[in-house]
């Protein structure tokens, strides 16, 4: 066996035989974002939430195209049919049975399949559920956009400028946040009639307050630090200071906050639709569908199930995602 | 401190005025008059307008509106729901019920939430912890109205059908005020339970890890005493922060719960009023919600000022 040597020098002999034993352990430098990503990946709940959100969003766009029904097309003799799915029906579930009778066969609809069943007007619940989900996705996006633009902008300006401007802007927020959401929505619903527009406007008016407060307090903390002073001394204009120096440092907080406001917004829309102040039939939103299902829950409980499940899953996923993001951006906050 | 409270009061008052003005503008914005739908002759309508002061110039009406509401609590009469009944009478009849359910839910929710939090924090990273945490995530994720529907369906309908005995009535019944308020209260308190449990757990875990709890342990106190006497008290302080969101959730919750369980409260009244355009009632209910909300916020702010002097300074107590 050849003697292990160091380099080409044969005068020295290696004592330890294992290579690994001697190697210095040098950790790879990990950037902040990569670190966040790694922590996020390790969080099972958050990843599941993320996958569910992607799946539900995908279904919201593709689902309604998977059959020939539209959200408002009615088939007169197909009312209140329970769910029936091909292949799966052989297993004894989703086979179109109600109270021991196959409703489809009774009506002579041998090769008709409604995956989620139909409602009391003969509309396909599969299509309506996914069309309704689109509304929730839209509201989620809207909430994020409002947080990102209005909330962050307001907080940045108020915190950075300080002084009189800050005082005025903060008093304004205090008054605005003293008005209950419900009252603002009521105002819009009365002036503009119930619908997606009044809900969106109500969100635009109130949805950003929490975010602006968080951003402002962060800016107040950061703007006294030396790196800002250095930037200022080198002649950076205010816009650069705000966007290049301050923003990257608070962006983690911003993402967390906006993720937490999403489930709230989704809940609010569906809640308004449920009590009849949101979208109006025949338009579908999850809240409208739940209200429809609720009306006939005693006789046809299958109608209410799909929208309830999708809504709960969507909100659960966003909550899990937000929790996961918070833990990965700021592991100290979790502590345990 | 007095200066701080004074400032808070001033802001609360300005907020109230803003809301009132908004509501007044809303009233003005309404197309036509409240008597549009009725078959009235031109002169009769004129008479009614005169009677309710609808012909006065706007500033005069603004003044009367403000004075009537703020000094007498007078919102005029109902146009549609109970024709010509005083709005304040209608509200008086319904408000206590809404407040009762709100308080019941708050009490039940806080107690259960705190107990759950204590269980989770004491058994950190065990199956109990996972279960309570999972439960509270579910409680936040599932909308309150879905809970209400579920309770009403499974416990109100299915259970009655299966056992032949009605343990929980499906809807609120004025003649069984306690028995039939069980389900609505549980449904309304779900969000409270989840929020309190989530928040308290984090606080408790932190407090339990702190030195003075270690000292208490070293002194030989039993764990029950440590929790109730030392840890819980300190963990309760920051819970003030969740009072705001809880108020909001109880308010929105009341709309739904009253609708689902048929409780004649003011949330149900608001929804009905919006659908039949009974403006005076809408304004009155909005006013009460706002008052309630403003008082709650004032309470939170002042409580904060007492607990944490730094906030007093930051929120402008000095200037």
Image (spheres, grey):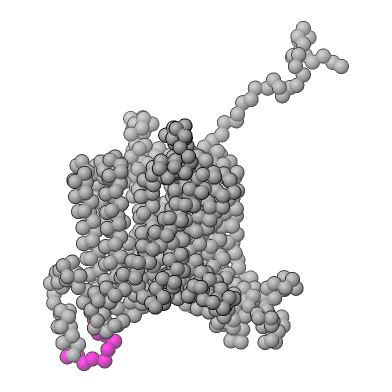
Quarter of the figure with residue A199 = bottom left
Residue A315: percent from left, percent from top: 51, 59
> Measuring 30% from the left and 55% from the top, which residue is drawn there?
B297
Quarter of the figure with residue A225 = top left
Q: Tell me the magenta residue range.
A: B32-43
Can the viewer see residue A275 in this picture?
Answer: no
> Measuring 29% from the left and 83% from the top, which residue is drawn there?
B82
Horizontal side, residue A219 vs residue B155: left or right: left
Say if A125 sits above or below A169 in the image: below
Horizontal side, residue B96 vs residue B76: left or right: right
Can the viewer see residue B236 in this picture?
Answer: yes
Residue A120: percent from left, percent from top: 55, 82
Residue B25: percent from left, percent from top: 23, 69
**Residue that extends furthest to the top in the rendered view of this protein:** A11
Q: Nearer the viewer, residue B182 or B24?
A: B182
Residue B35 colored in magenta in the image = yes
Residue B274 colored in magenta in the image = no
Number of dots carrying numbers: 0
Residue A310: percent from left, percent from top: 56, 65
> Measuring 42% from the left and 60% from the top, which residue is drawn there?
B108
Horizontal side, residue B146 vs residue A67: left or right: left
| Quarter placement of the N terminus of chain B | top left
| Quarter placement of the C terminus of chain B | top left
> Measuring 62% from the left and 76% from the top, which residue is drawn there?
A117
Say if A285 sits above or below A229 in the image: below
**Residue that extends furthest to the right in the rendered view of this protein:** A1
The prevailing secondary structure element of the residues shown in magenta is: loop
Q: Nearer the viewer, residue B262 or B178?
A: B178
């Amino acid at each position: 066996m050849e003697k292990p040597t160091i380099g080409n020098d044969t005068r020295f002999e290696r004592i330890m035989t294992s290579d690994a034993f001697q190697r210095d352990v040098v950790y790879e430098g990990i950037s902040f974002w990569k670190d966040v990503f790694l922590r996020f990946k390790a969080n099972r709940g958050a990843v599941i939430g993320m996958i569910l959100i992607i799946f539900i969003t995908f279904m919201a766009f593709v689902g309604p195209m998977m059959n020939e029904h539209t959200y408002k097309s009615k088939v007169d003799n197909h009312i209140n049919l329970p769910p029936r799915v091909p292949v799966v029906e052989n297993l004894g579930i989703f086979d179109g049975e109600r109270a021991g009778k196959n409703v489809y066969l009774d009506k002579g609809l041998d090769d008709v399949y409604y995956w989620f069943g139909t409602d009391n007007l003969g509309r396909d619940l599969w299509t309506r559920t996914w069309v309704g989900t689109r509304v929730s996705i839209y509201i989620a996006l809207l909430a994020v956009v409002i947080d990102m633009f209005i909330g962050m902008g307001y907080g940045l300006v108020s915190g950075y400028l300080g002084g009189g401007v800050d005082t005025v802007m903060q008093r304004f927020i205090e008054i605005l946040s003293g008005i209950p959401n419900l009252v603002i929505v009521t105002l819009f619903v009365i002036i503009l009639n119930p619908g997606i527009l009044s809900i969106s406007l109500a969100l635009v008016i109130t949805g950003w307050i929490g975010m602006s407060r968080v951003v402002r307090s962060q800016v107040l903390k950061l703007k006294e630090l030396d790196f800002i002073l250095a930037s200022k001394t080198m002649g950076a204009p205010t816009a650069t200071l705000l966007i290049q120096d301050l923003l990257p440092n608070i962006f983690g907080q911003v993402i967390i906050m906006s993720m937490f406001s999403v489930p709230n917004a989704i809940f609010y829309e569906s809640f308004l639709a449920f009590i009849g102040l949101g979208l109006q039939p025949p338009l579908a939103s999850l809240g409208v569908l739940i209200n429809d299902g609720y009306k006939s829950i005693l006789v046809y409980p299958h109608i209410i199930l799909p929208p309830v499940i999708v809504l709960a899953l969507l909100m659960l996923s966003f909550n899990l995602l937000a929790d996961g993001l918070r833990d990965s951006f700021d592991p100290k906050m979790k502590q345990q | 401190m007095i200066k701080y409270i004074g400032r808070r009061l001033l802001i609360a008052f300005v907020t109230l005025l803003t809301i009132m003005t908004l509501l007044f503008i809303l009233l003005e914005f309404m197309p036509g008059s409240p008597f549009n739908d009725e078959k009235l002759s031109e002169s009769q309508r004129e008479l009614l307008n005169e009677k309710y002061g609808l012909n006065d110039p706007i500033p005069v009406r603004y003044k009367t509106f403000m004075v009537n509401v703020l000094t007498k609590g007078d919102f005029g009469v109902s146009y549609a729901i109970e024709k010509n009944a005083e709005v304040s009478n209608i509200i008086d009849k319904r408000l206590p019920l809404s407040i009762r359910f709100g308080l019941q839910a708050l009490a039940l929710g806080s107690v259960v939430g705190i107990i759950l939090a204590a269980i989770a924090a004491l058994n950190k990273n065990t199956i109990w912890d996972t279960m309570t945490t999972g439960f509270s995530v579910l409680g936040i994720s599932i909308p309150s109205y879905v809970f209400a529907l579920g309770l009403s369906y499974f416990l109100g309908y299915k259970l009655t059908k299966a056992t032949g005995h009605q343990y929980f009535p499906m809807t609120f019944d004025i003649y069984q005020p306690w028995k039939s308020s069980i389900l609505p209260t549980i449904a309304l308190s779900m969000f409270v339970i989840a929020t309190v449990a989530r928040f308290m757990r984090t606080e408790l875990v932190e407090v339990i890890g702190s030195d003075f709890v270690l000292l208490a342990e070293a002194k030989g106190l039993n764990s029950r005493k440590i929790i109730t006497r030392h840890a819980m008290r300190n963990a309760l302080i920051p819970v003030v922060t969740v009072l705001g969101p809880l108020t909001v959730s109880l308010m929105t919750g009341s709309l739904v719960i009253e609708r689902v369980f048929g409780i004649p409260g003011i949330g149900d009244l608001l929804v009905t009023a919006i659908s039949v355009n009974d403006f005076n009632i809408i304004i009155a209910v909005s006013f009460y919600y706002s008052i309630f909300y403003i008082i709650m916020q004032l309470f939170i702010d002042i409580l904060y000022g007492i607990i944490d002097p730094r906030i007093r300074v930051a929120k402008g107590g000095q200037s």
